[in-house]
Amino acid sequence: MAKILIVDDDPDVVETVGLFLRQDGHETAAAFDRREGMAQVAGFKPDLIVLDVMMEQPDDGLTMAQDLRRLGYKRPILMLTSINRATGMVYGKDPDVAPVDDFQEKPIEPATLIAKVNHLLRQPEV
């Protein structure tokens, strides 16, 4: 099916998300920080990215999404994060700050994850 890159500094999240996506027939690759994620985008060429917000720096995921969009990456980005719970503030999609296609709180039910991913993969590139 699709090639999906999972970028998160938590190996348990990467493994669990990857497991569910592979069970749904997708090919996955992993990165554990923004630098590694950007390198994987160039080499793996994912159809979709599952991206955490807070990694080495509190805004690494946001910065990575901004950089990707600036570089012309038009494929879907699903931001999967616990930032709202961690900070007490409400974050969501924003064309400048969080240029992603969907913003979901962790933990996410496997069926919801698969539904969101498959929905985003069916959307036309913008």
Image (cartoon, helix red, strand yellow):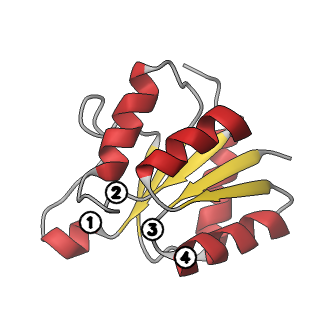
Where is the C terminus found, in terms of image quarters? top right
> Which quadrant of the figure has residue 15?
bottom right
Q: Position of residue 62 (x, y in %)?
A: 31, 45
Name the residue beneath numbered marker 3: 9
Quote the CA–CA distance across marks 1 and 2: 7 Å
Residue at x 61% of width, y 22% of height: 125
Q: Is residue 37 left or right of residue 24?
A: left
**Distance between the alpha carbons at the discs numbered 3 and 1:** 14 Å
Marked residue nearer the N-terminal end (4 or 2):
4
Q: Name the residue at 39% across, 41% down.
A: 64
Q: Is residue 30 among the parts visible in the rendering?
A: yes
Q: Residue at x 72, y 40 (%)?
A: 44
Circles 3 and 2 in contact, beta carbons < 8 Å: no
Q: CA distance from mark 3 to mark 4?
A: 6 Å
Q: Is residue 113 left or right of residue 102?
A: right
User: Mark 4 — residue?
Assistant: 11
In the rendered structure, are the residues bearing label 1 and label 2 in contact, judged by CB atoms less than 8 Å apart?
yes
Instruction: Report x, y in % for residue 83.
Output: 26, 66
Q: Amino acid at mark 3?
A: Asp
Towards the viewer: 77 or 114: 77
The residue wearing badge 2 is 53
Q: Position of residue 25 (x, y in %)?
A: 86, 59
Local secondary structure at mark 3: loop
User: Does residue 45 appear anywhere in the picture?
Assistant: no
Around disc 3, counting alpha carbons within 10 Å, would you say few (fewer than 14), some (14 to 19), or many (20 or more)? some
Nearer to us of marks 3 and 2 is 3
The residue wearing badge 1 is 83
Instruction: Name the secondary structure under disc 1.
Output: helix
